Amino acid sequence: MRGAATAAARRRGYGFVSYARCFNGIVWRETLRYWHQRERFVSALVRPLVWLFIFAAGFRSVLGVSIIPPYDTYVLYEVYIAPGLMAMIVLFSAMQSSLSMVYDREMGNMRLLLISPFPRWFLLISKLAAGAAVALVQVYAFLAIAYFWEIEPPSPWGYLTVLPAILLAGIMLGALGMLLSSLVRQLENFAGIMNFVIFPMFFASSALYPLWRVKESSPWLAFICELNPFTHAVELIRFAFYERTNLGALTIVLAAAIVFLAAAIVAYDPSRGMLPRREGL
Amino acid sequence: MGGPHPALEVLGVSYSYGNRKALENISFEVEPGSFSVLLGLNGAGKSTLYCLITRLYATRFGKIRIFGFDVNRSPGEALRRLGAVFQARTLDLDLTVVQNLSYHAALHGIPAREARLRADLVLEQVGLSASRNAKARTLSGGQMRRAEIARALLHRPRLLLLDEATAGLDIKARAGILKHVRGLVKQSAIGVLWATHLIDEIEAGDDVVLLHRGRILDKGKASAIAERADAADIHAAFEKLTAVDGGGRQ
């Protein structure tokens, strides 16, 4: 009798609407938190704009870009690096979200999330989606400013077609950040990890220079760039901005997102992950 | 559902951090509508046990059940019946009190409108209605604790865990929180597990689990523990039991 009642209650669980409420709550909290940290928004914009207006202007005459897909003609260097800078915003935003997870863990807020009765994978995916949504706002703010410097897609549809690419890149990079956050014990250590991840990922990619250029000077570096999932996130965004699909990049970004996400979920699982083996979660 | 089951069952639980044993063969129960105290010095293993009950850590040895639901096998069912106040402050300081409660409500799938009504009710219960729109960082230590208790009660749990809930508070705030939680047991028949190292928070009729260096030294009514230890009260019993060989007996 007792067993039947227990089984019935277990089956009741939560419905779709309850899951949606939980998801909305997590996104709402991240948005609210972001709203309270307006300087984060400003710094997220200043960084790519400095690259665009200073770095790109300086290197325009030094770094030539030949006609490569998705471009149908020669493009200015500013135009070439714009997708890389969009990806850069997503990368920094993802790492910032992960940093806030480590902070939450140190401050104890993370416990509140982890003792929710919803499955942990769902909670982590919701948190990732919230982070990707925040990155999306930053990217569109950057594009709005860049528009006045004639950085725009061939047609307004490009603004729409780039959206899923940014979201997927955000989830892939966010999942990587989440995985890193599970491996890091203290906030101070995470700053070091970020330096070891962000800069090599960004510079060893096609964000600032096309891969054929890298290959000319160092085939090994070009090979490393090819292995770097961030390179493919950049290319996915670049093609999507030009209303085209880079299937190779899409496949690699999707696969990397799944692998990083699965690893992050395992890492945050109390029975299998890294977290419970240490004191003071 | 839940009537015939204890609010909490801890059965033969052991836990280690690497080679260091934090808990060894811990077993006890908390009945619905009872106030149970987990008494132990700092480092006794109280927080580790709370992490296991809330599934922040996985139970590898032994079983933990909340109203009959195994925390490892049916975490959703177990956790929805559980409210927790941790030793570390877990309010989001940049959010208002009511926003903190709304976030918690969302994490339990409670509709926004219902959450607002419940928030008003629990804030009134803990005497924080006037501070509902205040940023959490502007609250005093005692108010923060009361806000956390209100939040833990929002989803109407039937078991409430409080880990050193009065740590760092002044005497008046401590007494107020303790009185409020004891009142909850009487009014709502909620089961409470109150972890503390402060013996003056225990009353003679409380169920006490005396934890020391990861082992249970004794358990039962405070008065019975004192009697078994041949001591005048629980304070003297605690002194006596923890002094024996620095460890304990089960």
Image (cartoon, coloured by chain):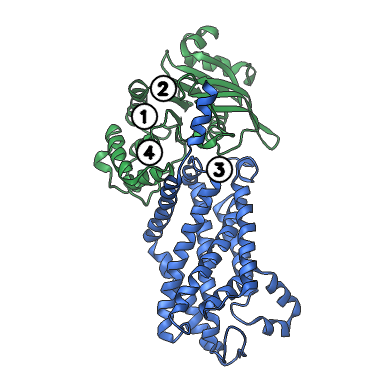
Q: Please tell me how crowded label 2 is: few (under 14), some (14-19), or many (20+) other residues with Cα within 10 Å.
A: some
Q: Residue at x 33, y 46 (%)?
A: B112
**Could you tell me the amino acid type at mark 4?**
Arg
- Give the number of the mark in front: 4 or 1: 4
First reached walking from the N terminus: tag 4 or tag 1: 4
- Residue position for label 1: B174
Up-down: is B243 above or below A12?
A: above
- Residue position for label 4: B151
First reached walking from the N terminus: tag 2 or tag 4: 4
- Residue position for label 3: A281
**Could you tell me the amino acid type at mark 1?**
Arg
Chain ID for green = B
Q: Colour of chain A?
A: blue
Q: What kind of element bears circle 1?
A: helix
- Give the number of the mark in front: 3 or 2: 3
Q: Position of residue B203 (x, y in %)?
A: 41, 16
Q: Are marks 2 and 1 in contact (CB under 8 Å)?
A: yes
Circles 2 and 4 on the same subunit: yes
